[in-house]
Amino acid sequence: MSLDSGRERGINLIGYTRTENGVGEASRMAARAIQAAGIPFGMIHIPLNGAQSEDRSWSHMEITDSRYSTNLMYINADSVTGVYHRLGWNFFAGNTNIALWHWELPEFPDTWSSCFEMLDEVWAPSRFVQQAIQEISPIPVIRMPHAVNVEVPQWSGRSYFGLPVGKFLFLSMYDTWSFQERKNPQAAIEAFRKAFPEPDSNAGLVLKVNNANSMPEQLEQLKRSLAGIPNIYLIEISLTRPEINALIHSVDCFVSLHRSEGFGIVLAEAMYLGKPVIGTLWSGNTDFMNAGNSCGVSYQLVELDESYGPYSKGQRWAEPDVEQAAYFMNRLVSDAEWRNKIAAKGQHTIRTEFSPLKVGAMMKKRLEKLKRL
């Protein structure tokens, strides 16, 4: 444990607090939980090159100094050293230093093991991530889930996005920075094609691609794969956080046939809004998805035949059963009673077990155990 810095008890929450992507939203989720627990805190925004960073919903909580005795970084392992250099080592000296890390495969990279020396403990958003990091960590690894709360603007509606009002709409969404190979949008497209091959189908698939311009070749490849498939609506323009919330709220079901997830934030957000979800039943999202509250898709574990960014050749991830996903799509459209039942159960799971109040209490209990509150 770090020596006492003499600073006020509370949290310096460090992250991409204005950035409009998954890791940015994770830091804002943490802010909601900390606030719900009544813990004193301030937020320190770390700019992320190339990312849209216009979410200033928490700018009133921003600070520039190490005001509190605990530094909580919602910064992944590959960026921790850079944050230390940016803020200066004195910012961390004497404080308790904790980082919440996302990771998406069973084996945590040894190349990041030096980061453990800079921390007192690591938090993980799911049991899947916790287990992966624990395998090589010399310090405690604590499960600390994301706090899910989705505010939908009053103007929410399909017409805003140019989407058809009368169709049953599925939504699949991913960020090109999160690796298309991992997010696997092609599986959602294929499942939809199998489920609804007719042009006059009453179902549609909305594909939202975040940071579409960052990977133009991937985007063109995606567009080519959509050729000849009716009732697919591609949204590639940048959307604000309220617009994203409105989009999720406007559809009937969210689909994520990912090969791996550290948590699965959008799945949880859709469930919070009472939407049935279809998702690969492997990795971080299994903390909140089960057969009673969602459509969990079976899979086979396969080895990566090449490396994709930090995801190394030879590691394993899931190949979801597209046929089963297509079956779920059809049933959700045709069986309203079942659809409403699982949607209600999913909403209950998220709103009770992953609320800011619940997660905030977990944070407070842990920091009290560390004698930091």
Image (spheres, helix red, strand yellow):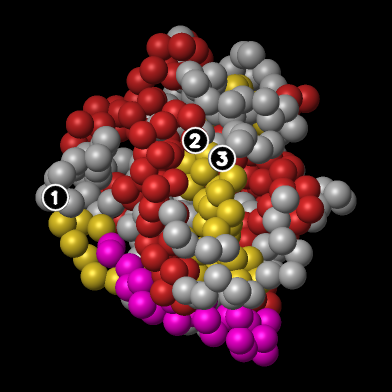
Q: Label 1's element?
A: loop
What percent of the width, then of the height, locates residue 320? 33, 68
Q: Label 3's element?
A: loop
Identify which residue, 181 or 219, lies in the foreground: 219
What percent of the width, then of the height, locates residue 159? 79, 53
Residue depth check, mark 1 versus mark 2: number of the one nearer the observer? 2
Residue 358 appears in the figure: no
Q: CA distance from mark 3 to mark 2?
A: 6 Å
Q: Check disc 1 and report the residue beneath it.
A: 305
What percent of the width, then of the height, locates residue 218? 37, 39
Q: In the figure, 340 relative to 228: above or below? A: below
Task: Look at the image and say whether residue 266 sits in the magenta stretch.
Answer: no
Q: Check disc 2 and report the residue beneath it.
A: 212
What's the magenta region? Answer: 318-341
Identify which residue, 153 or 61, lies in the foreground: 153
For the point 49% across and 21% down, the residue is 50
